[in-house]
């Protein structure tokens, strides 16, 4: 009620104030119009991130990552693969960051590369503007699973970008692969970080024999990655952030065609490229694990649930149960972030209570030979 009174007061002030910047004639502006404009103005200010990447057609178009340096096994390179030199900043909520954390675990790089996680819900990152993004807690007990930045003393991911580049003007995203020695961002593109973790650190990895980008499967993996990224990984975002019906319809059509395609592939083999786990599986998994809990509701991907795809659902449980994977899935962080950080999609930040799926339950994927 207080909020409504505040809106009405501002509406009255604007109607009476000759300095109003609204372009409509005062006689045609209604209270409902004002409320829409008021909320839209504040929503845009609160979520200046992927939500801003909307084309004139109303479609979501993701921009490319900007820090693209490469860590190499070559000791003479600018960024050599050295134990203890690098730190991975992640959010458990972010699928792109989570796949990097999955690689860190399954390759056995936990002792060589440290990591820390931010708080799940976007907050103000500066007193000078309204931008809201990833922030660190003030203490280790403030938000379970999130930690203060003990390396740089940063209060937000934004601060890390500003340390790395004083003139940076892009998005402040995770993951961030940080060089402790040079105090800069090496790379913030997850698809490249997982390739580095897969191959460049094998001299110090505890599981160096695991190769998720096998030479004889590279072409197949690259092909699968391309359509899964466009139609599934990024496809759910294209559904959720669309601001017009037609781009939403097209994104949803492509999403479910791709899910059907995956279901058919997994009817014949354990993984996407046969009976060997590859990079393509980890990249698909991070979207599937969030599908029923978040995307089906928050991003309007409700034509068919993951649980209605027998092969995909059991496949998701299978990957979840690989040692090192389940610890990368913090469903509380995931749900708090999506439902609490996108006010234009979920204005009141209400978090659904379910469905609380048990991905540690038995699956049927052993029916395929390893």
Image: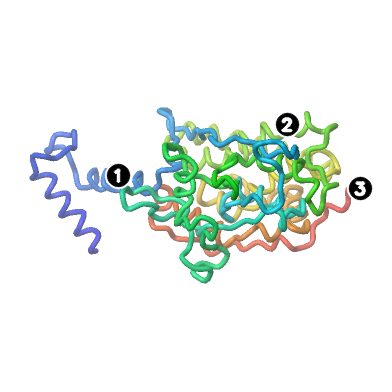
Name the side, left or right, on which 269 lies relative to 37: right
Residue 68: x and y, percent? 59, 35
Is residue 31 shown above or below 222? below
Which residue is label 3 attached to? Answer: 369
Between disc 3 and disc 1, the foreground one is 1
Q: Are marks 3 and 1 in contact (CB under 8 Å)?
A: no
Q: Position of residue 28 (x, y in %)?
A: 16, 37
Q: Which mark is residue 222?
A: 2
Q: CA distance from mark 3 to mark 2?
A: 24 Å
- Rendered position, 338 above or below 69: below
- Percent across and percent down for residue 174 are 55, 47
**Closer to the camera in the image, 192 or 55:** 192
Q: Nearer the viewer, residue 346 or 340?
A: 340
Residue 356 % position (x, y)? 62, 63
Provide the secondary structure element on which disc 3 rests: loop
Question: The N terminus appears in which quarter of the rendering?
Answer: bottom left
Camera-nearest residue between 204 and 283? 204
For image coordinates 59% across by 56% down, the residue present is 92
**What whole-number distance in Å separates the C-alpha atoms at marks 1 and 2?**
41 Å
């Amino acid at each position: 009620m207080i909020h409504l009174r505040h809106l009405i007061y501002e509406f009255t002030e604007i109607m009476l104030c000759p300095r109003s910047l609204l372009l409509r004639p005062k006689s045609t502006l209604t209270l409902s119009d004002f409320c829409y404009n008021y909320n839209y103005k504040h929503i845009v200010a609160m979520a200046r991130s992927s939500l801003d990447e909307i084309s004139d057609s109303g479609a979501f178009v993701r921009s490319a990552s900007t820090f693209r340096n490469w860590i190499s096994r070559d000791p003479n390179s600018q960024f050599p693969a050295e134990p203890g030199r690098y730190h991975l900043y992640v959010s458990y909520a972010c699928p792109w960051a989570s796949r990097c954390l999955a690689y860190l675990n399954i390759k056995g790089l936990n002792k060589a590369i440290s990591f820390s996680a931010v708080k799940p819900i976007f907050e103000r990152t500066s007193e000078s503007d309204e931008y809201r993004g990833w922030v660190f807690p003030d203490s280790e007990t403030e938000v379970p699973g999130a930690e203060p930045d003990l390396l740089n003393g940063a209060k937000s991911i934004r601060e890390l970008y500003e340390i790395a580049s004083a003139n940076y003007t892009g998005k402040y995203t995770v993951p961030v692969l940080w060089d402790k020695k040079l105090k800069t961002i090496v790379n913030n593109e997850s698809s490249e970080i997982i390739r580095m973790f897969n191959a460049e650190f094998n001299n110090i990895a505890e599981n160096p024999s695991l190769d998720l980008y096998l030479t004889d499967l590279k072409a197949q993996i690259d092909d699968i990655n391309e359509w899964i990224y466009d139609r599934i990984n990024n496809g759910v975002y294209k559904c959720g952030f669309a601001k017009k019906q037609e781009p939403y319809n097209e994104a949803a059509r492509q999403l479910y065609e791709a899910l059907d395609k995956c279901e058919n592939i997994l009817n014949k083999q354990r993984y996407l490229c046969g009976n060997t786990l590859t990079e393509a599986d980890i990249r698909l998994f991070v979207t599937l694990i969030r599908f029923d809990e978040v995307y089906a509701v928050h991003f309007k991907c409700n034509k068919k649930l993951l649980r209605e795809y027998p092969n995909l659902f059991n496949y998701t449980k299978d990957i979840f149960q690989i040692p090192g994977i389940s610890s990368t899935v913090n469903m509380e962080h995931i749900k708090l972030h999506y439902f609490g950080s996108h006010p234009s999609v979920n204005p009141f930040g209400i978090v659904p209570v379910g469905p609380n799926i048990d991905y540690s339950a038995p699956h049927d994927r052993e029916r395929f030979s390893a």
